[in-house]
Amino acid sequence: MNNTPQQQNAGRALARILQYNTGKSHTAFQFMQAAIPDTDANILLVQEPPLLNGTPLPLDDFHCFPCRKQACWTVTSVRKKAFKSSSVISDPHADFLVVSVTLHSKDRKPATINIANCHYRLQNRNWRTRDQPTHSLDALFHEIFALADLVAGNMNKQYPRWETGRQPSQWAQNLVDICNAANFRLANIPNTLTSYPINNNRPATLDLTFFNQDHITVRDWHTHLEHKALDHTPMSYQAWNKIGTQQEYKGYN
């Protein structure tokens, strides 16, 4: 008889990730909090977090890493004592950060996972002259994929790889080319919608998860419509480093 994912992962120090664009909404943030026990998440990747006095809201039992203190568009929160260590390894930027988490391990060099949390947004466009739009991360994706083992967030990009029938934009093609060159794989289940606009526009797959298949494994990616508050749907998945065996980890959670 095949083991369940929980049985297969017993003994591993897993990154159990909950990824959610809360749209700056305090209500959506509360929905995310309700999803934490349901998903047993120990890492939260939040895009467009709600702010209080210009700073992201804290969470009990989590170390919260904002991409920067003010005008923050992404926050990564790591459950206290879930990992041996966690720290930001990228320079401050409004739209992304990379956090490194080190797994509990008996090995002298414990395995780490570097996780990039991104919010890809339109920075500038002159609609009168119809010039080319400037997006926040176009020039930085090479750096992000070089730093990270997992790249996730609200990418706002449409492409037939994750949603059949969509015509790729040049910016989506740029992301896919960088992803392929870095040997990253898409964790999303193709054609699984992640955004349901409240203005009744066509639903789309805009929230993406990529991982370096040489370094880590990602399993059990799925969405949680029951915890959707506004446009975006939260999603959860598990990740662990390929270095080491199941017996090497202490299984902290």
Image (spheres, helix red, strand yellow):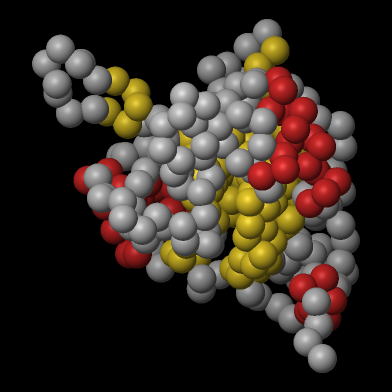
Residue 51 seen by the camera: yes
Q: x, y percentage for residue 234?
A: 64, 43
Residue furthest to the bottom: 1
Is 105 left or right of 52, judged from the image as shown? right
Decide: is 10 above or below 212.
below
Q: x, y percentage for residue 6?
A: 82, 71
Decide: is 100 above or below 6.
above
Residue in view at x 74 percent, y 56 percent: 16
Residue in view at x 35 percent, y 47 percent: 158
Q: Quadrant of residue 240?
A: bottom right
Residue in view at x 69 percent, y 61 percent: 238
Residue furthest to the top: 53
Decide: is 137 above or below 205.
above
Decide: is 68 above or below 215.
above
Residue 93 seen by the camera: no
Q: x, y percentage for residue 32?
A: 74, 36
Residue furthest to the front: 200
Q: Nearer the viewer, residue 38 or 219?
A: 38
Q: Nearer the viewer, residue 200 or 46?
A: 200
Q: Nearer the viewer, residue 114 or 225?
A: 225
Residue in view at x 29 percent, y 20 percent: 124
Q: x, y percentage for residue 246?
A: 78, 79
Q: Quadrant of the N terminus?
A: bottom right
Q: Quadrant of the C terminus?
A: bottom right
Q: Quadrant of residue 103?
A: bottom right
Is 42 left or right of 217, judged from the image as shown? right
Q: Nearer the viewer, residue 92 or 191?
A: 191
Is 203 left or right of 140, judged from the image as shown? right
